[in-house]
Image (cartoon, rainbow, N blue to C red):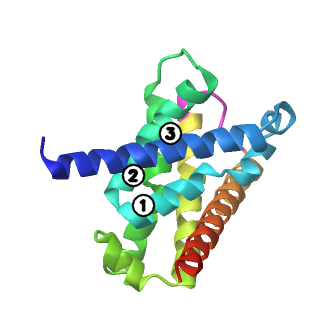
């Protein structure tokens, strides 16, 4: 097999595994029957941080890994036996691609130029752009996922409060995961010196 193919597949598999871990962590630490009933469990959605971080570090490979992780996490963690519907796949795709949509919006506005080369993107990135990416991706995800849920007929279009819960939860989850990742990386850099 081609080494490049193996490298790409290993990145996708790693991103998928990290997403499944973050989903498990969210289910175990945050979501409970009382918080799930009124969407309060969505006020800290940890997997969104994995989505944003993987899109920043790996570009479209991050989207693919997050997409498959989002599709498989309920089966792996919850043991769900129901087949994935087209709407579930749509929600997974929107969630996984929301950081790249945010990057595309920032490129369109001229704030970013190297969104398809992760190394160049990271050189251009600063804290203000990172916060903007987190806010944009959270807004895209919370609005479109709730729109897909309404089209599916699961519920009527959710109230603005629920969309706000999802928006805040995606932001909080992304800030938590990225902050912890930076602390770990900086700790390893100091330890190496």
Q: Residues under labels 1 and 3: Cα distance? A: 14 Å
Magenta stretch holds residue 155: yes
Q: Residue furthest left?
A: 2
User: Where is residue 141 shown, x and y percent of the image?
Assistant: 55, 53
Q: Position of residue 75 (x, y in %)?
A: 54, 25
Q: Nearer the viewer, residue 8 or 135?
A: 8
Q: Which mark is residue 63?
A: 2
Give the dominant element type of the magenta stretch: helix, strand or loop.
loop
- Numbered-mark total: 3
Q: Are marks 2 and 3 in contact (CB under 8 Å)?
A: no
Residue identifier under label 3: 70
Relative to 185, does residue 167 appear above or below in the rendering? above
Would residue 177 appear left or right of 12 to someone viewing this image?
right
Q: Residue at x 23, y 46 (%)?
A: 6
Residue bearing mark 1: 55
- Decide whether residue 173 is among the magenta residues: no
Where is residue 7 shown, x and y percent of the image? 26, 51
Q: Earlier in the sequence, mark 2 or mark 1?
A: 1
> Does the image show residue 112?
yes
Quadrant holding the N terminus: top left
Mark sitting on residue 39: none
10 Å neighbourhood of mark 3: few (<14), some, or many (≥20)?
many
| Residues at circles 2 and 1 in contact by the CB criterion of under 8 Å | yes
Closer to the camera, 137 or 189? 189
Estimate the x, y position of residue 179 in percent, counting from the top left: 64, 69
- Magenta stretch, residue numbers: 151-158
- SS for dot 2: helix
Disc 2 crowd, CA 10 A, few/some/many (<14, 14-19, 20+): many
């Amino acid at each position: 097999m081609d080494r490049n193919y193996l490298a790409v597949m290993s990145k996708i598999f790693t991103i998928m595994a990290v997403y499944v871990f973050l989903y498990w962590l969210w289910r175990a630490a945050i979501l409970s029957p009382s918080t799930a009933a009124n969407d309060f469990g969505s006020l800290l959605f940890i997997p969104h941080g994995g989505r944003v971080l993987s899109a920043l570090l790996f570009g479209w490979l991050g989207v693919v890994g997050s997409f498959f992780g989002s599709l498989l996490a309920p089966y792996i963690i919850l043991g769900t036996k129901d087949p994935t519907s087209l709407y579930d796949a749509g929600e997974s795709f929107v969630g996984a691609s929301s950081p790249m949509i945010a990057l595309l919006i920032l490129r369109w506005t001229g704030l970013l130029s190297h969104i398809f080369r992760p190394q160049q993107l990271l050189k251009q990135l600063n804290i203000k752009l990172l916060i903007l990416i987190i806010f944009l991706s959270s807004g895209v995800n919370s609005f479109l996922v709730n729109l897909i849920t309404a089209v599916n007929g699961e519920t009527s279009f959710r109230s603005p409060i629920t969309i706000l819960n999802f928006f805040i939860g995606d932001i909080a989850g992304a800030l938590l995961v990225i902050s912890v990742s930076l602390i770990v990386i900086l700790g390893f850099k100091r330890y190496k010196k």
